[in-house]
Image: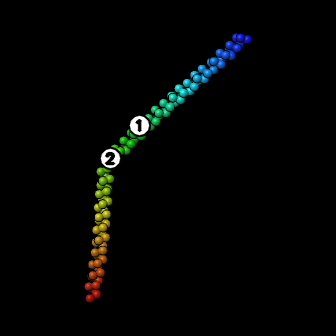
């Protein structure tokens, strides 16, 4: 009976140690998983950075063409204004001509 009691006491003493050991293993596994997730996120961030760099280079390559488009757009707007002025002037001339024609 004493041997059985000692076995029970030994088991009870081992259980907290076993629980602590299991907790430690669980924390260790969680740390490993967290570390792997951070490595994945690092790879994703590196890929995003690389893609952003590529896009910036492409945009820089397109910039001269975009500047040309802006210049052409300004020229078209100026030409449009000139066309409106010319149209208004030609209407005035036409009205004057019709007025002179009636005399």
Crowding at dot 1, Cα within 10 Å, few <14 / some 14-19 / many 20+, comes out as few
Left or right: 62, with 30 as reference point: left
Comparing 1 with 25, the one in front is 1
- Judged from this view, the residue extending furthest toward the right is 1
* Residue sitting at x 42%, y 40%: 48
Locate the N terminus by quadrant: top right
Q: Whole-percent x and y of residue 101?
A: 27, 85
Q: Which mark is residue 75?
A: none
In the displayed structure, 69 sits above or below 12; it is: below
Left or right: 45, with 2 as reference point: left
Locate the C terminus by quadrant: bottom left
Q: Which residue is denoted by mark 2 in the rendering?
A: 60
Left or right: 50, with 12 as reference point: left
Quarter of the figure with residue 97: bottom left
Q: Whole-percent x and y of residue 37?
A: 49, 33
Q: State the separation of the CA atoms marked 1 and 2.
A: 21 Å
Crowding at dot 2, Cα within 10 Å, few <14 / some 14-19 / many 20+, comes out as few
What is the secondary structure assignment of the residue under circle 1? helix
* Residue sitting at x 29%, y 71%: 85
Left or right: 32, with 78 as reference point: right
* Residue sitting at x 29%, y 64%: 78
Q: Which residue is denoted by mark 1 in the rendering?
A: 46
Foreground mark, 1 or 2? 1
* Residue sitting at x 31%, y 50%: 63
Q: Whole-percent x and y of residue 36?
A: 49, 31
């Amino acid at each position: 009976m004493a041997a059985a009691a000692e076995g029970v006491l030994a088991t009870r003493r081992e259980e907290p140690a076993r629980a602590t050991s299991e907790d430690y293993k669980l924390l260790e596994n969680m740390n490993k998983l967290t570390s792997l997730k951070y490595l994945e996120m690092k790879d994703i961030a590196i890929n995003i950075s690389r893609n952003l760099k590529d896009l910036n280079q492409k945009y820089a390559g397109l910039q001269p063409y975009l500047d040309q488009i802006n210049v052409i757009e300004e020229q078209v707007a100026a030409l449009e204004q000139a066309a409106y002025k010319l149209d208004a002037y030609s209407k005035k001339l036409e009205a004057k001509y019709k007025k002179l024609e009636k005399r």
